[in-house]
């Protein structure tokens, strides 16, 4: 199975901060990488697919980049509603696998 | 807009069979892959299985032969059964939609069901 490693596991930030979360795959997954946001008690929601394509309705402050094994999710100016846990997920090879998550907390 | 609504028993004893169903509203089962994903309390996400309308299925080998996914096109629903459950199967189970089979192209999960907490305890 492809292992997905996210860093950091958590970070404390302030509103309007720039946030960068990284995701590393154990082998090349080309651009087959998605990002999800999950708030407590809710299902994840899709933010970014195919590494850099923004899902409809997602604010433009979210962006994704990377290919191969290294990927990044960036929030350009964190808003109060962005405090959540973020997961990456590879869709290159079955079984599909997720990263361990990055919890974004209020400083 | 497609919405998924799921239901099933929330409390099981060890060795019993987990059974969950997900109904698809506002769209057809045809043309997509329908997936189950689980999340143990406080932990990350695990892909379980997927099915389309044919049905064609794919399973996560980590769960072995305990998992069965099925589809009922007449009701626009799909279901998950997990046999011989243990405490390790305690998790929130989600249903979700994907555009292509796992590992066969760019794909993602959207939308998701609301989640069902299944607790296994004696």
Image: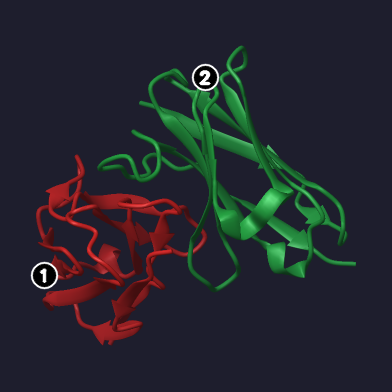
Chain colours: A red, B green
Chain identity of mark 2: B
Secondary structure found at label 1:
loop
Residue at (11% x, 60% y) in the render: A61
Q: Secondary structure at mark 2?
A: loop
Q: Residue B99: horizontal and vertical position, in percent?
A: 34, 33
* Residue B6 image-quadrant placement: top right
Mark 1 lies on residue: A77
Mark whose residue sits in front, 2 or 1: 2
Would you identify the image quadrant in which residue B30 lies? top left
> Are marks 2 and 1 in one subunit?
no
Q: Locate residue A9, reporting x and y percent.
A: 35, 82
Relative to A34, say whether A69 is above or below: below
Tell me the quarter of the image containing the C terminus of chain B: bottom right
Disc 2: CA contacts within 10 A as few (<14), some (14-19) or many (>=20)? few
Tell me: A90 left or right of B38: left
Tag 1: Cα neighbours inside 10 Å, few (<14), some, or many (≥20)? Answer: some
Left or right relative to B53: residue A63: left
Identified at 88% across, 59% down, the residue is B13
In the picture, the disc for residue B54 is 2
Asked whether the viewer can see residue A104, the reply is no
In x, y percent, where is residue B94? 54, 48
Compare residues A75 and B65 and report the one nearer the observer.
B65
Q: Position of residue A13 (x, y in %)?
A: 23, 83
Are the residues tagged 2 and 1 within 8 Å (C-beta)? Answer: no
The residue sitting at the right extreme is: B122
Q: Residue at x 43, y 64 (%)?
A: A1
Task: From the viewer's perspective, tell me whether residue B75 is left or right of residue A104.
Answer: right
- What is the chain letter for disc 1? A
């Amino acid at each position: 199975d492809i292992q997905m490693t996210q860093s950091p596991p958590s970070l404390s930030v302030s509103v309007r901060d720039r946030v960068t979360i990284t995701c590393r795959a154990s082998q090349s997954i080309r651009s087959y990488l998605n990002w999800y946001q999950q708030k407590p008690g809710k299902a994840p929601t899709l933010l970014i697919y195919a590494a850099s394509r923004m899902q409809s309705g997602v604010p433009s402050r979210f962006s994704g980049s990377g290919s191969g094994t290294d990927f990044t999710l960036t929030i350009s100016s964190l808003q109060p509603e962005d405090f959540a846990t973020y997961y990456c997920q590879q869709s290159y090879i079955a079984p599909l696998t997720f990263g361990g998550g990055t919890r974004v907390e209020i400083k | 807009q497609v919405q998924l609504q799921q239901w099933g028993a929330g409390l099981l004893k060890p060795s019993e069979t987990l059974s969950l169903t997900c109904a698809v509203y506002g769209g057809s089962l045809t043309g997509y892959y329908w997936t189950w994903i689980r999340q143990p309390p406080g932990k990350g996400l695990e892909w379980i299985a997927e099915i389309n309308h044919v049905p064609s299925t794919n399973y996560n080998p980590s769960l072995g032969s305990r998992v069965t996914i099925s589809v009922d096109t007449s009701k626009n629903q799909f279901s998950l059964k997990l046999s011989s459950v243990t405490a390790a199967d305690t998790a929130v189970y989600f249903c979700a939609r994907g555009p292509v089979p796992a590992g066969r192209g760019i794909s993602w999960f959207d939308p998701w069901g609301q989640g069902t907490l299944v607790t296994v305890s004696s």
